Image (cartoon, grey):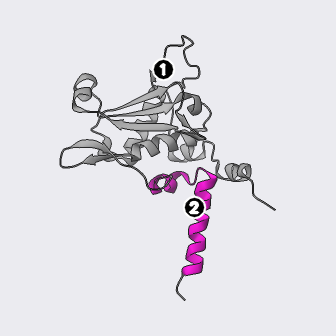
């Protein structure tokens, strides 16, 4: 029997299981409808901030003394068939003076509202993992990832896509075929 993409997606879906296991509680109401004025492109993401604060408290103690803005963008950027669910950017000295933020996490609202609770936590955690402190300057800087996901995110949430499952299976096969006897 062949495994389809839907089969894998169903196997890796966790709904809100991890959120409940970790004791995450949401008190901020979700932004369900985008303003219909046609001009609004960004909205402060209170729901995103609540998740970010809980994740920082639990996993990213190094970010506690830094001010991170969380923003919804009306539509997630797309290129070809890829959708960018989230972005993170550090703020320059002028922006920090004007607005008081060290970094900004931007999430596409159109895709956010389609995500399960655990996937929302995963996404914010992933974006936070792009931030690291330069201990010489004390400033936040961004770091890339070499594969589609950070190992720390996978440890907590498991794989999120068929591609990640394929990566794990390939590594397991490599180990099996290349272990010294």
* Residue 69 position by quadrant: top left
Is 98 positioned to the left or the right of 89 in the image? left
Q: Magenta region, mostly helix, strand or loop?
A: helix
Residue at 59 percent across and 50 percent down: it is 160
Spot occupied by residue 13 in the image (x, y as percentages of width and height)? 65, 47
Spot occupied by residue 102 in the image (x, y as percentages of width and height)? 29, 34
Residue ID for mark 1: 41
Residue at 60 percent across and 46 percent down: it is 17
Indicate whether 139 appears above or below 29. below
Is 24 positioned to the left or the right of 64 in the image? right
Q: Quadrant of the C terminus?
A: bottom right
Which labelled disc corresponds to residue 167? Answer: 2
Which SS class for mark 2? helix
Q: Mark 1 Cα within 10 Å, few/some/many (few <14, many 20+)?
A: few
* Residue 2 position by quadrant: bottom right
- Residue 8 part of the magenta-drawn span: no
Magenta segment range?
149-178
């Amino acid at each position: 029997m062949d495994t389809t993409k839907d089969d894998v997606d169903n196997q890796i879906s966790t709904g809100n299981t991890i959120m409940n296991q970790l004791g995450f509680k949401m008190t901020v109401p979700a932004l369900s409808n985008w303003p219909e004025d046609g001009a609004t492109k960004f909205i402060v993401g209170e729901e995103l901030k609540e998740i970010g604060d809980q994740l920082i408290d639990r996993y990213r103690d190094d970010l506690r003394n830094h001010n991170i803005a969380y923003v919804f963008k009306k539509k997630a950027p797309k290129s070809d068939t890829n959708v960018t669910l989230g972005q993170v950017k550090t703020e320059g000295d002028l922006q920090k003076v004007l607005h008081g933020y060290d970094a900004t996490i931007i999430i596409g609202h159109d895709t956010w509202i389609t995500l399960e609770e655990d996937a929302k936590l995963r996404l914010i955690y992933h974006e936070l993992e792009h931030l690291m402190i330069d201990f010489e300057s004390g400033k936040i800087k961004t770091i890339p990832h070499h594969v589609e996901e950070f190992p720390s995110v996978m440890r907590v949430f498991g794989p999120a896509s068929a591609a990640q499952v394929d990566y794990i299976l390939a590594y397991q096969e490599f180990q099996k075929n290349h272990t010294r006897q």
